[in-house]
Image (tube, rainbow, N blue to C red):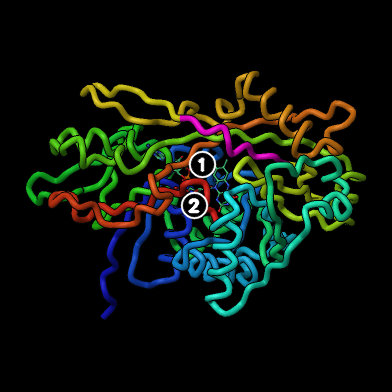
């Protein structure tokens, strides 16, 4: 006799939703439906971008262990490895020298039994990498190279994982969830209602809606009269960050690849991701531009929501932010690269769900009527890997 499968409805086909669907698709116990407001790949998701950095460097033992587990898939999984570029990464450290971030990360590596990093004297950066000629190193006290890191084509990798999941029986639906519904008789979540008037039910609901989490949960919190201090907004906020994408020539790709340009973490200020032959894109992500967009709900609650709803909206970055970021790249990060007035030709404000400690919120909802509602959110700008 075959066992009856349990049903799960995953809201959101970004990183957490796609990954959950992919892994559950390898188990015979679940019938999985994933629902997203946009068709695959959902372009407004934080999961969908030209690149995301893949590294294991964390001062926390827990996250270092998890990242080491995750990076195996980037090295070895036939479903992922072709999207991974093992360029290594350089971490330029601008945190206070005593108890610096790099020393804590390297201690964690050492405590696990193997530290793959090596020092790079700051003055040698420009000798090794043409792109870093003229890079401002004042304010940094050290740099190290980790050859075990790199970056991935996040859009293609996410899309492929979802395709594999679908081939293994996962159902992918395109519709915007407008309500998470409760079954009053059973006192549990029954499913969702979508903007096209459909309802979907399941035994278990997983909310993996990233930066849109508060907007989806808030009406339910109103209906259940959840106290202000216990609402999701106190634990997860929608936060946007600016990225600049420069198209480069074949010759420039060749030069970056010849000098083996790795990912560069420019301290807490931003990150450079090198181009590949395929994307011909040099990326700078400005970690200093983080902003929230707070709106008032019909019930008078203040919640954070992504300001831009579509991928086109996200590309519409205010001129002031563009010029601040371009000036920073051309004066500090990569002056050599920016000579001849090179400008970014594509911009994005990408939104993520950020928690106060940057830890994930991966749990069952604590309210007694929401015992079959699970959360997988809180990417906090580091959870694609
Ligand atoms: C600029 C930037 C740079 C980053 N760099 C890195 C990096 O280098 N390395 C790294 O590991 N991580 C990085 N991250 C973090 C990583 O991308 C995110 O943490 C991760 O992608 C979040 O996944 P998620 O599933 O929570 O959200 P998302 O990937 O955003 O997915 C949420 C999904 O929910 C859907 N959704 C929302 N509301 C609804 C609704 N009402 N109905 C239906 N569907 C809905 C959305 O359409 C979306 O597809 C970065 C993030 C940003 C923004």
Nearest the camera: 92 or 65? 92
Q: Is residue 338 magenta?
A: no
Residue at mark 1: C-beta within 8 A of ligand 1: yes
Residue 331: quadrant of the picture? top right
Instruction: Give the crowd class for mark 1: few <14, some 14-19, many >=20 residues within 10 Å.
Output: many
The quarter of the rendered structure image containing the C terminus is bottom right
Residue furthest top in the image: 319
x and y percent of residue 258 in the render?
89, 56
Left of 354 or right of it: where is 30?
left
Left of 371 or right of it: where is 171?
right
Where residue 45 is drawn, which disc sits there? 1
Please name the residue shown 20% across and 48% down the image. 190
x and y percent of residue 24 in the render?
41, 65
Please name the residue shown 68% across and 68% down the image. 117
Would you say the magenta stretch is mainly helix, strand or loop? strand
Please name the residue shown 44% across and 66% down the image. 62
**Helix, strand or loop status at disc 1:** loop
Nearest the camera: 327 or 203? 327
Of the residues under marks 2 and 1, which one precedes in the sequence? Answer: 2
**Helix, strand or loop status at disc 2:** helix
x and y percent of residue 179 in the render?
27, 36
Q: Are marks 2 and 1 in contact (CB under 8 Å)?
A: yes
The residue under label 2 is 15
The image shows residue 43, relative to residue 373, as above or below, that is: above
């Amino acid at each position: 006799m075959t066992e009856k499968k349990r049903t799960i409805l995953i809201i959101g086909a970004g990183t957490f939703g796609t990954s959950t669907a992919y892994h559950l698709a390898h188990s015979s116990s679940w019938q999985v439906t994933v629902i997203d407001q946009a068709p695959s790949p959902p372009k407004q998701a934080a999961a969908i971008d030209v690149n995301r950095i893949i590294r294991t460097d964390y001062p926390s033992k827990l996250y270092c262990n998890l990242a080491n587990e995750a990076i195996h898939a980037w090295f070895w999984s036939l479903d992922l490895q072709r999207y991974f570029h093992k360029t290594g990464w350089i971490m330029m450290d601008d945190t206070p020298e005593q108890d610096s971030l790099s020393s804590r990360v390297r201690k964690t590596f050492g405590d696990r039994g193997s530290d793959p990093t090596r020092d790079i004297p700051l003055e040698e950066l420009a000798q090794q990498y043409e792109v870093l000629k003229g890079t401002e190193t004042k304010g940094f006290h050290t740099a190290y190279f980790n050859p075990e890191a790199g970056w991935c084509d996040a859009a293609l990798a996410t899309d492929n994982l979802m395709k594999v999941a679908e081939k293994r029986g996962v159902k992918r639906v395109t519709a915007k969830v407008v309500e998470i519904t409760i079954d009053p008789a059973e006192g549990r979540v029954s499913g969702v209602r979508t903007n096209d008037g459909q309802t979907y039910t399941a035994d278990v609901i997983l909310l993996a809606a990233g930066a849109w989490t508060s907007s989806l949960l808030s009406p339910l919190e109103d209906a259940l009269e959840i106290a202000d201090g216990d609402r999701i907004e106190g634990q997860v906020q929608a936060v946007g960050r600016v990225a600049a994408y420069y198209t480069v020539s074949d010759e420039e790709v060749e030069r970056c690849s010849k000098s083996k340009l790795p990912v560069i973490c420019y301290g807490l200020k931003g990150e450079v991701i090198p181009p590949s032959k395929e994307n011909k894109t040099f990326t700078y992500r400005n970690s200093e531009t983080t902003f929230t967009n707070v709106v008032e709900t019909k019930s008078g609650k203040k919640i954070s929501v992504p300001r831009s709803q579509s991928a086109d909206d996200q590309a519409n970055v205010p001129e002031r932010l563009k010029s601040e970021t371009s000036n920073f790249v051309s004066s500090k990060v990569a002056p050599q690269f920016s000579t001849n007035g090179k400008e970014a030709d594509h911009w994005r404000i990408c939104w993520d769900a950020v928690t106060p400690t940057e830890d994930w919120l991966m749990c069952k909802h604590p309210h007694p009527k929401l015992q079959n509602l699970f959360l997988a959110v809180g990417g906090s700008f580091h959870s694609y890997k």
